[in-house]
Amino acid sequence: MTDPRVPPQETPPAEGSIAEAHEERADGGMWEHPGVWVWLIVLGAVIVAAFFIARIFAL
């Protein structure tokens, strides 16, 4: 017995599949928690600013 042909635009049914189709959530990777990166940038800017302020008072 041959399988019926499925048009190219359609997905053939899977045998024994009981799962419902759902949208897969994208993996955020390093961008999952952008607040961490913002605080690291702010901390770096404060350290650089403190360096220049210390040099002004050291003169």
Image (tube, helix red, strand yellow):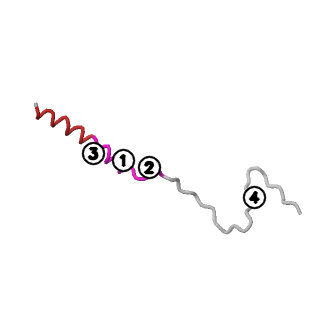
Closer-to-camera residue (8/2): 2
Residue at (36, 47) in percent of width and height: 37
Mostly what secondary structure, the magenta segment?
Answer: helix
Q: Amino acid at mark 1?
A: Trp
Q: Amino acid at mark 4?
A: Pro
Furthest residue to the top? 59
N-term-proximal mark, 2 vs 3: 2
Furthest residue to the right? 1
Q: Which residues are magenta?
A: 28-44
Q: Secondary structure at mark 4?
A: loop
- For the residues labelled 2 and 3, the Cα–Cα distance comes to 18 Å
Name the image quarter holding residue 15: bottom right
- For the residues labelled 1 and 3, the Cα–Cα distance comes to 10 Å
Closer-to-camera residue (48/39): 48
Q: Position of residue 7 (x, y in %)?
A: 78, 52
Q: Which residue is mark 3?
A: 43
Q: Are circles 4 and 2 on residues that touch, CB within 8 Å?
A: no
Is residue 6 shown left or right of residue 29? Answer: right
Q: Are circles 1 and 2 on residues that touch, CB within 8 Å?
A: yes
Q: Which residue is mark 2?
A: 30
Mark 2 neighbour density, 10 Å: few (under 14) some (14–19) many (20 or more): few
Q: Where's the C terminus, which quadrant? A: top left
N-term-proximal mark, 1 vs 3: 1
